[in-house]
Amino acid sequence: MNGLFKQREPLLALMVVALVLAVGVGAPVFLSAASLANLVTDSTLLVMLALAQMLVIVTRGVDLSVASNLALSGMVAAMLASRHPELPLALPVLAACAVGLALGLVNGWLVGTLALPPIVITLGSMSVYRGLVFVLSGGTWVSAHQMPANFVAFPLTRLLGMPNLVWIAAAVTLAMLFIARHTRFGRDLYAIGNAPHCAGTIGIPTARRLLWTYGLSGLVAGLCGYLWVARYAVAYTEVAYGFEFTVIAACVIGGVSIAGGVGSVTGALLGALFLTVIGNALPVLQVSPFWQSALTGLVILAAVLVNARGNGKRSRQILPLHKNALEQRAH
Amino acid sequence: MNSTALPTDPVQPAQPSTPSTSRYTILDRETRGLKDLFGRWEALLALLLVLVFAANSIVLPHFLDLYNLLDGTVNFSEKAMIALPMALLIICREIDISVAGTLALSSVAMGLAMHAGVPPAALPLVALACGSACGLLNGVLVTRFALPSIVVTIGTVSLYRGLASVVLGDKAFTGYPQLMADWGQGYFFGIVPREFVVLLVLAAVFALVLHTTTWGRRIYAIGNNPDAARFSGIAVDRYRLALFMLTGAMAGLAAFFLTGRIASTRPNIATGWELEVITMVILGGVSIAGGAGTIGGVLLAVLTLGVATYGMSLANIPGIYMTIVVGVLLLVTIALPRLLRARAARK
């Protein structure tokens, strides 16, 4: 039992449940089935993006371009669907995924093959992708009445009582779980994050792995791009502006180490759920929306502090080293 | 062991070419040749600046107007003020994502102080104090609790901006005293914007401190290898804390100028600035892996971006195209040396 709670995930799960219950005490409506289902639906996009981001962070990288990628792929899907309403739904969705994948591969090529620092590369591509949304759309909006009905309806259409969004997120979660734990690709990512040089020495094709990790992150961003514009029935340049930080925050809360090599699918999932619970609880508790950002910031800091305390001292030093030697290697 | 984990900095100066006459010749400093000069990042940036400038003056008929050119500097002066300490921080292997939030909160603090009847002359001090306090919190979290700075400042950026929006609500502070307008919008000698002069003075001070003092050398030492720096007796954490506070203070100063320039504090003040500031620093040749970079490079990058923006605004190109230009510039300048070197190595 003691060992169980030393691990991060059960503790985090407990915190999520405790948070939900605590909010429920203040506002019982929060615990209603409809509200909880809503919570799960709201969390889906963040969950998917956080899981993909986790794989990137595990390799000691970071993908700051996800939100811009999402906006661009979403815009492509929305424009395609609104210009050609006769196309089957699958085509705009595939287009969004393809665009997302392509954009991700660009990052992956620069980071992997050219071995450039991920934070700089994705910072640059983030600006470029966001700007391209404007170029593509000419700064105009694609709004609900321009999109075909089935395009907009799909994410919230119910299948076996759950919206499609939830099923998609569940499928992505299972896929990520499989990739991270049971494929050579996934295990290689942990090796790369833990000791990049050793990974090269034992024959892990680092460049190729990184290429496809960022590609995967882009692919998920593309899928989420379609889901986002369809769910909120609007596509414009500023879609998901600043969302990359929320995604990274979800990972960090979920115990994914920014220094690489550490992170689990469950952790990232719970981190995303945690942030969504906070986001959904504040309006229910009638906290002013202006407090939302401040409280989110506090929660992130608190979660990070709690996580850091678990690490403890790794080894004895004769001189007191600065303590974040291990963490700092990420950047 | 650190450097192995990180992609090596693409802008390291060329290896010193030791003369082959004696094995034991130890030069006081690296020999400098033309190749070294042109291999330097700053030289490339200067070339880029000249190119952008030349292109603009050929394409745009009204570009070469001294008054307009100087007026254009206000668009980047405040960001560049934050870029200076950010460069030091990144050289030191840290980063501060929270600067725009700090700026917003400092601006709000000035608004509150003004309504509380603080005299105009004390408002910059309020901004500086608020900025330093924000920086102090970042620094304490990073140094005391051994947290990675990128994570801490992602948290504090929502905290600071959130607190600012809690105070502001959906309103805005206006009616700032004339003193702030004088500094934010005013000119020296009727032609040089005061902000630009302040920026140049600050840049000179930062360059002196970073490049000529022991403190500056120690910042490089920490960035190159924090462990080695610690073992050679540098109080690493104290430097880190000081740099975070300095960055916060400069964000506060930028808040003073920006608030004076736009004469108001709005909830969306300076959104997205953190990334623009970091872009300036990295484009200036500061290595994200720490330990390399110069203030001169940062200033050149600031001017290059400034000239490009100004030219585009003269040509009536929407601002968002600028983000593409900045992004492409960043990607190309980072990737190009690596591509060229790879080609040279293959030959």
Image (spheres, coloured by chain):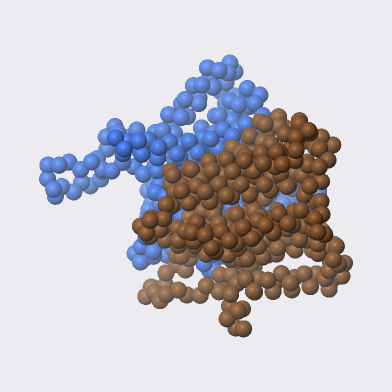
Chain colours: A brown, B blue
- Considering only vertical position in the picture, is B107 above or below A184? above
Q: B7 or B273: which is nearer to us?
A: B7
- Considering only vertical position in the picture, is B46 above or below B63? below
* Image point (84%, 36%), residue name: A145
x%, y% of residue B102? 64, 53
Q: B228 or B75: which is nearer to us?
A: B228
Q: Is residue A192 left or right of residue B75?
A: left
Q: Residue furthest left?
A: B22
Q: A226 or B24: which is nearer to us?
A: A226
Q: Is residue A312 left or right of residue B342?
A: right
Q: Is residue B265 left or right of residue B230?
A: right
* Image point (72%, 51%), residue name: B108
- Considering only vertical position in the picture, is A284 above or below B206? below
x%, y% of residue B208? 42, 46
x%, y% of residue A39? 78, 61
x%, y% of residue B147? 54, 64
- Considering only vertical position in the picture, is A186 above or below B40? below
* Image point (60%, 54%), residue name: A52
* Image point (81%, 46%), residue name: A153
